[in-house]
Image: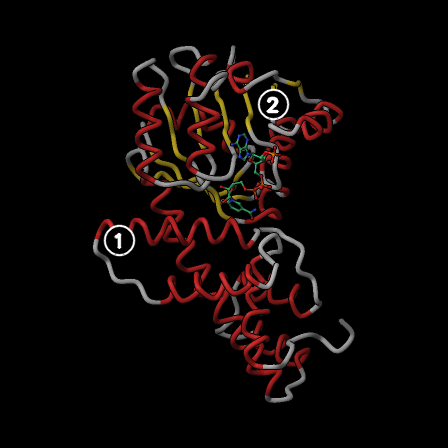
Amino acid sequence: MKVGFVGLGLMGAPMSRNLLKAGHSVRAWNRTASKVDAFVADGGEAAASPADAAAGAEVVITMVTDSPDVQAVILGEGGVIEGAAAGTVVVDMSTISPEVTRSVGAALAERGVPMLDGPVSGGVLGAQNAALSIMLGGDPDAVEAARPVLEAMGTRITYCGALGMGQVTKLVNQVIVAGTMAAVCEGLVFGAKAGADLQAVFSAVTGGAANSWQLENLGARLLKDDFAPGFMVRLQQKDLRLIMESATAMNLPLFTTPLVHHLYRAVEGQGHGDEGTQAYVKALEALAGVQARFPDA
Ligand code: NAP
């Protein structure tokens, strides 16, 4: 299919490559031009603007940071809305506010352009391996039209309901991810303070009922003193903020999410906002006066 792609960041870069590998014809735009040069070197085409990426495309993917960024690349000057023909399906795969998603979708609908929200889970590894879980909201016919493109990026494609429900599902995912990360770090700091052999702890616990994606992937990284992002602390903070805004609007009490959000503020205050979310452990370590690392890290 003819695909326009906007946003070649940590996630968008491998996702766009998987579209090329699957045989789709992809024209991409990124704010920082050097990332487009790398995409062209890998066999893609360069677009001069989001509108240009959308021109002639059957499906347009946006994968940028936050709600205002999606508004800018879709509705702003030179945005997708200026290039997309009626019937082009726009799939926003960023994690943003469900309310903003619905308002952007309404503006596109006035031009006859259907929008889906399709946020993802699975991290950079899932993006590289075309193994993302994609959470879709919007018109089921538009989902079917975009399916060949989605299947080139993900293995589990779930229809979650009307526009915005993909984002709601992703926020459920993030509540669970944040709480799990907090528990993984607290457990490992507990072990370190008690003088446990953390190699033995990691081996035993990953084989039992407390195992998780977070422990296996991010627990392993922090134990090896590897804090490179996958998913940056500052992006997780954006997601936790989105969760708390929605909870406030619903008058829903939350307990773990605000706690984790505030601990991550301490991590940011220590200067680690651009590190991976496993840097959560650094806030606990500063309080505990101990480090949770493998001896050879
Ligand atoms: P990233 O590496 O920081 O990339 C962000 C991308 O958005 C870059 O291409 C950036 O362009 C572009 N961008 C941001 N603001 C823009 C604006 N106002 N106008 C135009 N372009 C703009 O982030 P990422 O990790 O790929 O995350 C992208 C989205 O996926 C986020 O919503 C994130 O929450 C979500 N997500 C991430 C992960 C993960 O593990 N990383 C997992 C699931 C979901 P520049 O290159 O010019 O900066």
The quarter of the picture where residue 104 lies is: top left
SS for callout 1: helix
Mark 2 lies on a secondary structure that is strand
**Residue nearest the viewer, comparing 126 with 247:** 247
Q: Residue at x 63, y 23 (%)?
A: 23
- The residue labelled by disc 1 is 248
How many C-alpha atoms fall within 10 Å of the one at disc 1: few (<14), some, or many (≥20)?
Answer: few
Looking at the picture, how far across and down is residue 15, in whole percent? 59, 35
Coloring scheme of the render?
A: secondary structure
In the depicted view, which residue is nearer to us: 248 or 183? 248
Can you say which quadrant of the picture contains the C terminus? bottom right
Looking at the image, residue 198 sits to the left or right of residue 68; the answer is right
Q: Quadrant of ligand 1?
A: top right
Residue that appears at 70% across and 66% down: 225
Count neighbours of disc 2 (C-alpha within 10 A) and say few if under 14, some if 14 to 19, many if 20 or more: many
Query: Residue furthest toward the front?
Result: 269
Which numbered marker is on residue 28?
2
